[in-house]
Structures are given as C-alpha cells and as structure tokens.
Image (cartoon, grey):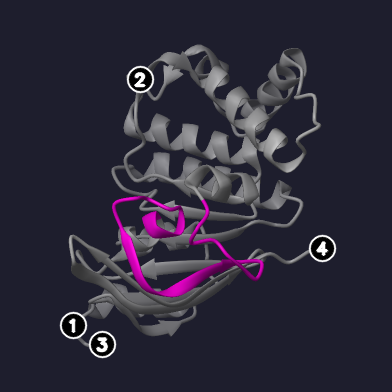
C-alpha cells in the first residue's frame, strides 16, 4: 500500500497583513488520523483553508508539500484532483444543481485531470456507483435528486460532505469542525461514514480534523492530537491527551 503524505513546514500565513499562523509544522500520512484542537482564533480553520488554497490567505513563509511536491502554486481544483479534500464547517447551498449532477461533474473533472485521455465515466455507471455508496453510508437515495445542500439540515449537509468524500476518494481528508452543529446521533452517523470511507479507501485515507470538542474523538480515535494556540502548535500527544485537554482546558499549556 502506497503511503501518501501531507507535510506542513514552518508555515506562516497572514490575513490583511495580520499574522495568523506563525510557523506551523506537521506531517500527516495516509494511514494516520491527526486532530487539531485549540481555542477560538488560534488559526485552526485558517490552516484548513490554506492547505486547500483559499485566496483570502497569504502564505508569507514556509511550505506545504504533498508527496514531496510543493502545492503552494497549485489552484484549489488541482489540489483536489491530486487527492486532497476539505469537508467544510459550513457547506454552501447550491440551488439548481442536484447532488448527483455536482458529484458527477467533480468525478469526471478528477478523472480528466489525472488522465487527459480518459473518456469519462458513463452516466448510468456513475448512478450505479453512487447508489451503492449511498446504501453503504446509509444515506437516503433522495439525496441524489435534491439540490446540493439546499434546504438540508446541518446533519444532512455533513452527510453530503461524507458522500462527496466517498465519491472522490481522497488520499488526505481535512475535516474542518465537521462536528459543529451536530447532535450526538447525527455525529455518530457522520463519524461512522468517515470511518467507512477510510476503510474502503485504497490508500486508507489520512485524516486531519479540526475540532473544538473531545466528543468527536470518541468516534474517530486520533493517532495524534495537536494544540494550536496563537498560530503555533504548542503541544502534541496521543488520543489520551484530548481527554486531558477536556478536563484542564488550554490555559495550562
């Protein structure tokens, strides 16, 4: 099994000339789960967005490597086509485009990017694949014909993100506060979906998840937990470290 790696090296990022990340270093392999925790305003969501190439953020130092190659000059779609994926904290609603249409377009774009001569998956084959994935993830088949996230509940939007992940099969998935706004039942369903996608992945899919709360870590047990505070990773540990943080908070670090 090939091991893919996302390496963040001394990453420094500013927004409107204000430093937000001040030298973050971290390596995520495709057989690992990493959790980023920390207080509000510490730079957690900034890190997620910078990895995927959001134009709002200016990288002022350091580098981001995917399988040894710098991605700083890559467009967001190129990063996605190469195997990076971001599950948004607040997924956007797109009226007029069904979930199935969106996923078919994304799947074909990734196919074409990785093989320009590829004819593109036939619609009936894609529908068959999508139906099988939805059954496996316990997602209502009506999702396919509904406009993407339009009128979806918070839990449904997060399920739609997991379905996108299952279709696109990334090497590294970034979960930006996926647990935000979910009750316990919805959280368990979403986490079970993430675990299913990870297990089905050819390369076992590495995960970098950003969260405020220890509760998601009971369902997606991390190999490593990192505390991001004032733009820097100030302490790291194993899964038991998250429980310590739950009890003590961040001020003791």
Q: Quadrant of the C terminus?
A: bottom left
Numbered badge on residue 183: none
Kindly state the secondary structure of the residue where label 1 is placed: loop
Chain-order first, disc 3 or disc 2: 2
Q: Choose between 98 and 153: the one closer to the eye.
A: 98
Contact between marks 3 and 1 (CB within 8 A): the answer is yes
Kindly state the secondary structure of the residue where label 4 is placed: loop
Chain-order first, disc 4 or disc 3: 4
Q: Which residue is mark 3?
A: 253
Q: CA distance from mark 4 to mark 2?
A: 38 Å
Q: Which residue is mark 4?
A: 1
Q: Which residue is mark 2?
A: 150
Kindly state the secondary structure of the residue where label 2 is placed: loop
Task: Give percent across and percent down for residue 122.
Answer: 76, 17
Q: Which residue is mark 1?
A: 251
Q: Which residues are magenta?
A: 49-74
Residue lying furthest front: 73
Nearer to us of marks 3 and 2 is: 2
Q: CA distance from mark 3 to mark 2?
A: 42 Å
In the rendered image, is residue 114 in sight?
Answer: yes
Q: CA distance from mark 3 to mark 1?
A: 5 Å
Q: Is residue 191 left or right of residue 3?
A: left
Q: Residue at x 22, y 77 (%)?
A: 230
Q: Is residue 200 left or right of residue 106?
A: right
Q: Residue at x 55, y 27 (%)?
A: 139
């Amino acid at each position: 099994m090939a091991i893919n790696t996302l390496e963040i090296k001394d990453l420094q990022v500013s927004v409107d000339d204000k430093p937000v990340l001040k030298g973050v270093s971290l390596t995520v392999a495709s057989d690992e789960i990493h959790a980023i925790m920390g207080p509000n305003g510490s730079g957690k969501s900034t890190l997620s967005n910078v990895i995927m190439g959001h134009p709002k953020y200016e990288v002022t130092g350091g580098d981001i490597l995917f399988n040894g190659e710098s991605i700083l000059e890559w467009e967001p779609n190129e990063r996605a086509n190469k195997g990076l994926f971001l599950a948004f904290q607040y997924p956007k609603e797109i009226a007029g485009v069904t979930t199935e249409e969106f996923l078919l377009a994304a799947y074909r774009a990734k196919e074409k990017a990785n093989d320009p001569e590829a004819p593109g998956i036939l619609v009936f084959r894609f529908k068959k694949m999508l139906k099988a994935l939805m059954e496996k993830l316990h997602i209502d088949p009506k999702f396919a014909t509904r406009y993407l996230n339009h009128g979806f509940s918070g839990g449904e939007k997060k399920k739609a993100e997991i379905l996108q992940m299952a279709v696109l099969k990334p090497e590294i998935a970034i979960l930006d506060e996926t647990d935000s706004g979910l009750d316990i039942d919805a959280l368990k369903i979403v986490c079970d979906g993430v675990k299913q996608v990870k297990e089905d992945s050819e390369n076992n899919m590495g995960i970098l998840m950003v969260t405020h709360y220890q509760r998601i870590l009971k369902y997606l047990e991390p190999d490593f937990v990192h505390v991001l505070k004032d733009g820097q990773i100030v302490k790291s540990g194993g899964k038991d470290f998250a429980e310590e943080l739950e009890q003590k908070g961040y001020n003791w670090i």
